[in-house]
Image (cartoon, grey):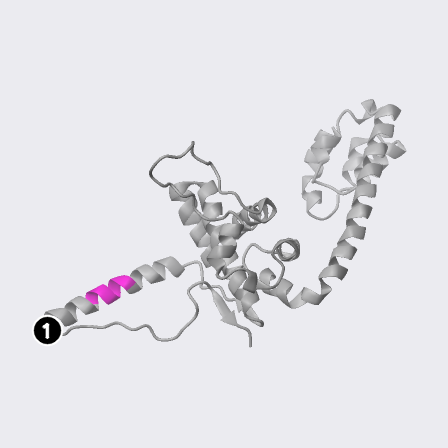
Amino acid sequence: MVTDLHGVTGRDIMDHLIAGERDPKALAQLARARARRKIAELEEALEGAEFFTPEHAALLAAMLARIDRVNAEIDELTAVIERLLAPYEEQLQQAESMPGWARRSAQDAVAETGVDMTRFRTGGHLSSWAGKTPLDHQSGKRKGRARSKKGNRYLAGLLGETAAAAGKTQTREGARYRRLARRRGKAKACVAVGNTQLKVYHKLLSNPGMRYQDLGPDYYERQRDIRRQIAHHVGKLGDLGFEVTLCRTPGPEPDGTSQAA
């Protein structure tokens, strides 16, 4: 019965159950905010509250007390982490500027890689160190076939989360994740987008003041249209006897980074 309420209301219903309240309607009225739209569902879920015994209440109280202790420890450790990472606030904000990244993601990444990107010659080297590059399918004699690339498993796990989170955003990274997920599956999309994110991370931290600048969820459609226009015009000029040399003018970086103002 209590599990039916998980994530729907706050702590009040469980506290009142422990205190002895058994009326489903009275308990359902404790719902707050958006959960109040589900009063009828809550009343139905709470049917049978009269069978919630004192023994159940004691067990629930013990579980909530354990959760409170863990939350208190998390708060203490979070304060320590914030204090230790205070000198790297600029780098944390740079990492947070990427789609799918939040404060905790940035903290975890900086803790694993440090902020000195000269340790990694390129973003590709950093990505390889994290195990977020494609597997090498070499020919010749070898023993078996690895299912995943070896690397920093903590950073690799973090990038799996940030890539999936980016896939839910209306950004270029989100569009790329969805395109790859449709064709190759979510697992490979996570690896590919995580690879790109780490390369962007490397470039950001290598350039103080730089921030991620999204190129838009329609980036790939625009690039496709541009290629078609280029091919059309080059073909027309070729028909007129001209030899065309193309040179791109300076603009936003293709990986979505820009220098902060």
Res. 40 in view:
yes
Where does the magenta region start and end?
Answer: 227-232
Q: Is residue 35 above or below residue 255?
A: above
Residue 231 falls in image quadrant: bottom left
Q: Is residue 121 above or below residue 133?
A: below
Q: Amino acid at mark 1?
A: Gly
Residue at the farthest bottom position: 261
Q: Residue at x 35, y 75 (%)?
A: 249
Q: Is residue 243 above or below residue 203?
A: below
Res. 97 in view:
no
Residue 113 falls in image quadrant: bottom right
Q: Identify the residue position indicated by label 1 in the image.
A: 241
Q: Quadrant of the C terminus?
A: bottom right
**Left or right, residue 192 beside residue 99:** left
Q: Residue at x 45, y 64 (%)?
A: 215
Q: Residue at x 88, y 25 (%)?
A: 54
